[in-house]
Amino acid sequence: MTKPDALRTAKSELHPRNRHRERYDFAALAASSPELLPFIKPNRFGDASIDFGDAEALKALNRALLKQFYGVAFWDLPPGFLCPPIPGRADYVHYLADLLAGSNGGDIPRGRSVRALDIGIGANCIYPIIGTREYGWRFVGSDINPVAIGAAQTIIAANPCLSGNIDARLQKQQAHIFEGIWKAREQFDITLCNPPFHASKEAMTAESNRKWKGLKNRDAAEAPTLNFGGQANELWCDGGEEAFVCRMVRESAAFGDHCYWFTSLVAKQASLDGIYRELKKARAVQVRTIKMAQGQKISRFVAWSFLTPEQREAWRQSRWHG
């Protein structure tokens, strides 16, 4: 059977610095992480692969990728928590680095002086892991779920390369995003967020059904499941991503002098108009929308800043060139 070009080249659309642009080398991954081996089987083209509809296979793949490419020896998730695909997560981090570089004469600010805030670190801790290992940034990660925070803290403590570089904080005020997490006089160079995508559990279930049909035979009798897992707060909220990001924009204004760039992923093109209106109301000084092409999927994130040109220059000099 001939492989369609889309299957051969889809990953070439990832960011140029993304370590996962090539097809997975399952032999190398299994050599470093033997627990992946039982999940590796020939796909319909005869190539080594895994069943991407199998949650345990995805978890084993993530463990292998994190070990081989990022030096993370221990990584685990409590049952039912989001197990995200790592290549897409890495893309967001690399594009964030480009955003900072664009504000710094083309040079990516690196090292522990750069601080990032991950809204919704989850139990997986993926964004801070990649940002710390690729660019040496320090992270604060927040989450409203104490089990997720505990799991993230376990990952951090178990890996010397992460300890001291990532601080997982429980958000006890569920009505707030930044308040209750952002300490007095604390500064962040960038914030990031993968907001709850769906507006309801019903909408999430419908999307799960659609994805299942893409992974399995349409006539298969198996009940659809979320192969990537996820808790309610990771997957949906009232109003979906647009309402969440708009709330983030409103709250970010109070911290505008303490952050260079606020950002959030936005999955739906239709969400942008409402977010732009909210940014205008909040009087953001700079607003950018950065597209990320991942094969046939187009993703994006919105970035905004409240700093004046003078404040931006002072920030660069004191934090990135000090």
Image: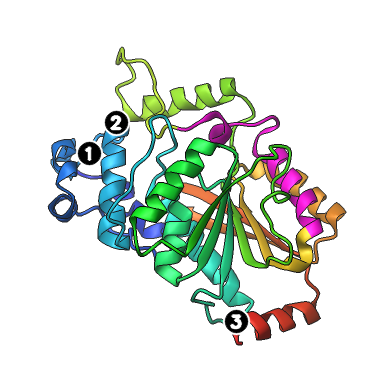
* Between 56 and 309, the one nearer to me in the picture: 56
Q: Position of residue 89 (x, y in %)?
A: 45, 53
Up-down relation of residue 15 to residue 267 (above or below): below
Q: Quadrant of residue 22?
A: bottom left
Up-down relation of residue 132 to residue 2 (above or below): below
What residue sits 67% from the left and 86% below the top? Answer: 317
Residue pointed to by mark 3:
320
Q: Is residue 123 visible?
A: no
Q: Which mark is residue 50?
A: 1
Residue pointed to by mark 2:
54
Q: Which three-letter amino acid code belongs to the residue tagged 2?
A: Asp
Q: Which residue, as the protein is rendered here, is positioned at the far top?
A: 221
Which element type, helix, strand or loop, lies under badge 1?
A: loop
Q: Earlier in the sequence, mark 3 or mark 2?
A: 2
**Are circles 2 and 1 on residues that touch, CB within 8 Å?**
yes
Q: Which three-letter amino acid code belongs to the residue tagged 3?
A: Trp
Q: Earlier in the sequence, mark 1 or mark 3?
A: 1
Label 1 to label 3: alpha-carbon separation: 43 Å
Q: Which three-letter amino acid code belongs to the residue tagged 1?
A: Ile
* Between 121 and 260, the one nearer to me in the picture: 121
Write down the region rendered in magenta. 230-254
Q: Position of residue 307 (x, y in %)?
A: 78, 71
Q: Position of residue 248 (x, y in %)?
A: 72, 48
* Between 288 and 236, the one nearer to me in the picture: 236
